[in-house]
Image: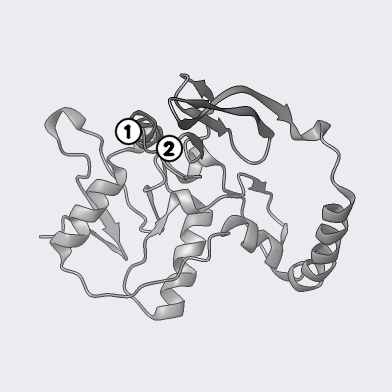
Amino acid sequence: MAHLDFAEDLELVRSDIVDVLLSGHDHYYISWDNDKVLWMDSGENSEKVGIMDIHMRSYMKRGKKRFEWESEMRFVDTKNIKGHPAIVAKVQQYEKYLKQALDIEIGETKTQLDSRRNTVRSKEATIGNLIADAMLQGVDADIAIANGGGIRAKKIYAPGTMITRRDIQTELPFGNVVVKLGLKGSQIWEALGKRVSQVEQNAGRFPQGFRNEFQMEPKSGSWFTCCFCGDWWTTFD
């Protein structure tokens, strides 16, 4: 099992290191059988279950035990899968506990919050600023940067929505920690440039919370031209 991007998966498949690869990350649907390696990726968000059936038999050849297989791979919509009773009971047990711990209102949003993928990975988002502001207050820093790709709920909160602990957990599920460190302006500039460099691919590295504005100039090799820090514009020399 792996969590690699497509290029790394392909390299692993071609290396003859593995016989069966179940991977993810890129959210593709892949079912590959080249008579040497079985490879399966099953999309994202548990929308479908990837099922791989392998039928193997062993035989002796020239005094050595050999194997051959036949495979069948298919994708099944999770809406059509009935939960196993024992697992359903266990999930309900956890959900009862989580309901008590997470369904607690912590505040009301006065403005719309948009955590959809195309928003948080391509432009300044109010929810990204909210998260970064919480980081700033938590560690008493001058600036804060959060990965847009770490904001995960993909939803819109209308003005007046009461935000709960469950909402926060859904938006920030990974358990990341805030790191405070001292950096030169040139280092911050370089980091921001790299973070916006794949904005056209909706890369998760996109920086949220820095109130940054940038001009895309890929032909010149310069993507990040200026940014807003506090009440002033800077080029970070």
Do we see residue 164 in this rendering? no
Residue 61: image location, x then y, percent: 47, 24
Residue 214 at x, y = what percent? 28, 43
Whether the residues at callouts 1 and 2 have beta carbons within 8 Å, the answer is: yes
Question: Along the line of sight, which residue is nearer the eye, 12 or 188?
Answer: 12
Furthest-top residue in view?
Answer: 34
Q: Residue 150: horizontal and vertical position, in percent?
A: 48, 53
Give neighbour class at mark 2: few <14, some 14-19, many 20+ (Cα, 10 Å): some
Q: Which mark is residue 79?
A: none
Name the residue nearer the viewer: 85 or 153. 85
Dot 1 alpha-carbon crowd within 10 angstroms: few under 14, some 14 to 19, many 20 or more:
few
Q: Distance between the Cα atoms at labels 1 and 2? A: 8 Å
- The residue tagged 2 is 18
155 left or right of 186?
A: right
Question: Quick check: 78 above or below 136?
Answer: above
Lateral position of residue 168 relative to residue 76, left or right: left
Quarter holding residue 41: top right
In what element is the residue under mark 1?
loop
Circle 1 residue: 15
Q: Where's residue 145, x and y in %?
A: 37, 61
Callout 2: SS: loop
Q: Nearer the viewer, residue 119 or 53?
A: 53
Residue type at mark 1 is: Ser
Task: Please name the amino acid that badge 2 sits on.
Answer: Val
The relative height of residue 229 versus residue 218 in the rendered view (above or below) is below
Q: Mark yes or no: residue 10 visible.
A: yes
